[in-house]
Amino acid sequence: MFLGTVFKMNDNMLASQVMLSYFINYENKDYLDLLLPFVKVSLPDSVGDVILLTDMQYCLESRFGIDLPLNVVEKLLKRLVGEYVKEGKYYTLDKLYDSTEFERHFTIIEYSVDRIISGIYDFLKNDKLLLNITKDRVKEMLVNFLDIYDFYMLNDSMALNELTIFDPAKDNFYIASYFLRDYIYAKYNHPTSSNFNCMVEIAKGSLAAKTIYYSINFKNENNELKQLDDIKFILDTGLLIDAAGLSSEESQKTFAELSNLIISNGGKLVTFDYFIKEMRDLIQEFIDQPEVRSFSTLTKLQDPDYVIGDYECAFRLCSSYVEDKGIKILRDSASKFDMESNHYMGVINYIKEIRAGCVPENLFECKAIFITKEKTTCQIYNEYEQESKLPFLAMTNIDLAAILWFATFNKDSKLPRLLMLNNAYAALDFNSQAYSAIKQKSKLLTAKSSFNFKEAMDICTRKILNENKSIKENTKENFSKDLKSLCSEDSDSNLKFMK
């Protein structure tokens, strides 16, 4: 399943998400408490005025971009009965709400969001990356960046389709370059002025919006984190690479935060030996094909100090690395998986077996669920959920993190910041997009010529890298490497100013 959001495209949408993040620090009883300040400021201006649900719904959407069902709007109004609202034949205003503090803080947040947009705009202009850029275009790039990396910004897919994104990989590269540069400069100069901090607040608001969506739609209205009661969270290959310590430092830290939330609340981490085999196959490819190493997701193995012996050690011990992180490997899965096609039905059959006919109404009743970093993989499970009416078969790691993080909210939690940093580093790297393009072009070239696959890979690699040459030059080529190097120095202390 995918968690949606409660926001629609709106000029104030980004500011509203930061405002939502602000209220998390003070109101954490349930999702309705987070929304109440927006409702209070949307009340009529005169005592005795009738409050129509449809008017309140329209005001929340038109001003803040918050899209709520009428039944939720009514629940919110009922919370204000006896304080600001009188309930009778109609809801009427019983007392005026003083919105001075709300408006003051919202104005500050709007300024902060405008500063982000202006900062990206100046960065792109001054570095001559996109000369014809406009601030409206920058805002679209920012929204698309957040959506691609699973911080869903909009509940309206049509609105996303209307964004004028011509090259998502390059656009995301630019956005990530700006924020990581800002992150580094803030670390060494003026932490309080960092636009990256505001981006993290947008991320927090996005995670909260996901949880509100979940609470509205899946019968978890009090937002209580019930014990996970031995729920089995089945991890895919990408998360196993994080767990084994073979990915980037940021990915490893993000996984550690999520796994701690799961285990400390009674959940179990499991995987199939099928996914262990997939991880080993990736390591073997890394060993056998030096030409693909720079495109690999095995970031740790790309360390220049590593040698062939380190690669072979990772191949031999990767399952032990995984088990050391508290992940149980379910053996003998060959009977469940068709190795020649895909793993989806094997996972689904295992989940059905564990549930024994039970149909969960929310995450905490699901008994077993597949967790993946890949939105496309989750989409396949989502389609099966809709066809079979078997809910909660799969979820992305960020959606799961949103629910668990919000329910166990801690002001000092690093999870939103780690997620944002991890996604920014991912966007700096064209490798995954380039590697997919290279493999696809190589297969076509092999089929249409006398070249073997390795020769085709060499030709297509040179072609793809040449196509990306201009962007590398424009961003001073080694920029991302320098940033990663700076951020990796004493990485724990790097985050101290943000706590």
Image (tube, rainbow, N blue to C red):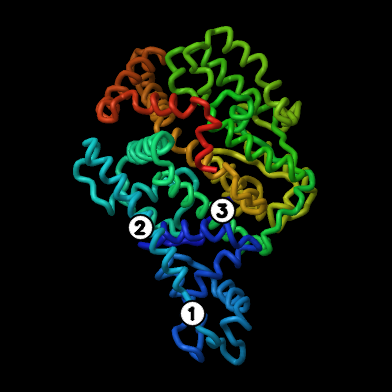
Residue 376 visible at all: no
Instruction: Indicate which disc residue 43 carries.
Output: 1
Give, as a three-letter code, the residue at label 2. Tyr
The local crowd at label 2, few if under 14, some if 14 to 19, many if 20 or more residues have their Cα within 10 Å, is: few
Name the residue at the front extreme: 189
Vertical placement of residue 247 versus 384, above or below: above
Residue beneath label 3, please? 3
Secondary structure under tag 3 reads loop
Instruction: Indicate which disc residue 111 carries.
Output: 2
Task: Residue at 32% x, 22% y: name it.
Answer: 465
Question: In terms of sequence position, does the residue under pointer 1 or pointer 2 come before the other?
Answer: 1
Q: Are the two marked residues, 2 and 3, in contact with CB atoms closer than 8 angstroms?
A: no
Residue 81 visible at all: yes
Secondary structure under tag 1 reads loop
Between label 2 and label 3, give the one nearer the viewer. Answer: 2
Give, as a three-letter code, the residue at label 3. Leu
- Residue 305 picture location, percent across and down: 50, 11
Question: In terms of sequence position, does the residue under pointer 2 or pointer 3 come before the other?
Answer: 3
Between label 1 and label 3, give the one nearer the viewer. Answer: 1
